[in-house]
Amino acid sequence: MSHHLDSPLARQDPRLDITDQYVFDAPGATVFAMNVRTSLAGDDTPLGFHDEGRYEFKVHFDGSPAEELTFRLSFDAEQNFRVVRLAGAEAADDAAAGAEIARGRAGEAVDGDGGVRVWAGRAAEPFYLDLRQLGAIDQVVQHGQRADLRPPADVASTFTGSTVSTIVLQVPHTDPQLSAGRGIRVWSVAKLATDAGGWRQINRAGLPMIWPIFRDHDSEVSSRSNETLPAGDRDSYGKAVEDMIRETVRRLGTTTRPDAYAATVVERLFPDTLPYVVGTAAAFSFAGFNGRHFGDNAPEVMFSLVTNSAVSTGLGPVVAGSADFPYVRPA
């Protein structure tokens, strides 16, 4: 999984479980995408988006520890939605009203203020991985056991035929804060309204595959960490992750300097936000992270990075994306 059903808290209502985040380039624009509510969660909760929830794209500029731009989406019971833009101090304020930039209905493409485009609806799952291989990686990294890291002989994506609820937001380079050439870091968050009138953070996602590799998805730690902010990731989880990477590459013998290698990887992984230079070609690769496209093989990149060896998943994209907005295949 990337972040599919990655904690007990997220599994309480899969509509608030962020399975993946993507940031990539379009002609004259930047695209932000978030997937939630995998069909693999079963039929116990409805498909679609939670009508008492919020879905937000958080954008950091110039190495800031706090977000300075937020795009917030909310839905009603009929799956009508509104999009609000919050800038500056308001970006991190749950009580801030912000400025509405679009309204629409799930399943319909909407043009909003300032040239933004929005689509939300059910789509074919773009993520691909045989979960048996993730199990082998977890045995090596989390438990220090031996395992065959090659894809199974009968490799097949566990996610073939599944669907997700997808939000796609396209923001033009004319946006006052998202001009071409600017470096940003992005994370997505799902929140639920509380009885007290506030908002509880249920799930967050930045880089793909981090937590399924380094953390037991049934642990309470996985729930607690989803309620925190990326700024605290290095202090909270850096040492444990660095230890796991160091011991993994030492046992595998893939570097003569396991301490230095592990420290370098942790610098890339934390805080758990996705870096991207606006206006450049997005690519999530072993060589570097610069956004992420729907077709990028994130598991292969992360497995190789953690082990410092070429680990193939034996798979390519199962679902063909579209070159046109909203870039997904509606289900």
Image (cartoon, rainbow, N blue to C red):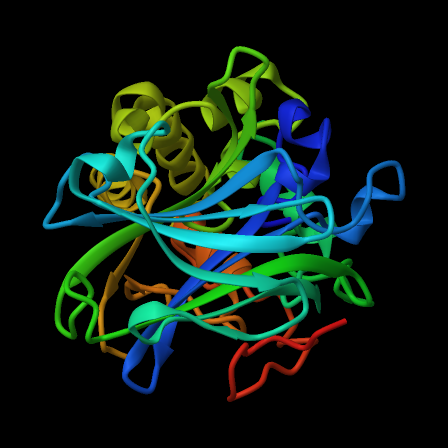
Q: Position of residue 102 (x, y in %)?
A: 44, 62
Of 125 and 178, which appears nearest the observer? 178
Residue 31 lies left or right of residue 120; in this view the side is left
Q: Position of residue 51 (x, y in %)?
A: 66, 39
Looking at the image, the residue that sits furthest to the top is 196
Q: Position of residue 312 (x, y in %)?
A: 56, 66
Of 160 and 266, which appears nearest the observer? 160
Q: Position of residue 293 (x, y in %)?
A: 45, 71
One can see residue 127 in this view:
no
Residue 120 lies left or right of residue 177; in this view the side is right
Q: Residue at x 18, y 35 (%)?
A: 89
Q: Residue at x 22, y 75 (%)?
A: 173
Of 182 and 56, which appears nearest the observer? 56
One can see residue 112 in this view:
yes
Corner quadrant of residue 28: bottom left
Residue 227 drawn above or below residue 116: above
Viewport quadrant of the C terminus: bottom right
Of 74 and 45, which appears nearest the observer? 74
Residue 24 lies left or right of residue 214; in this view the side is left
Q: Residue at x 13, y 65 (%)?
A: 182
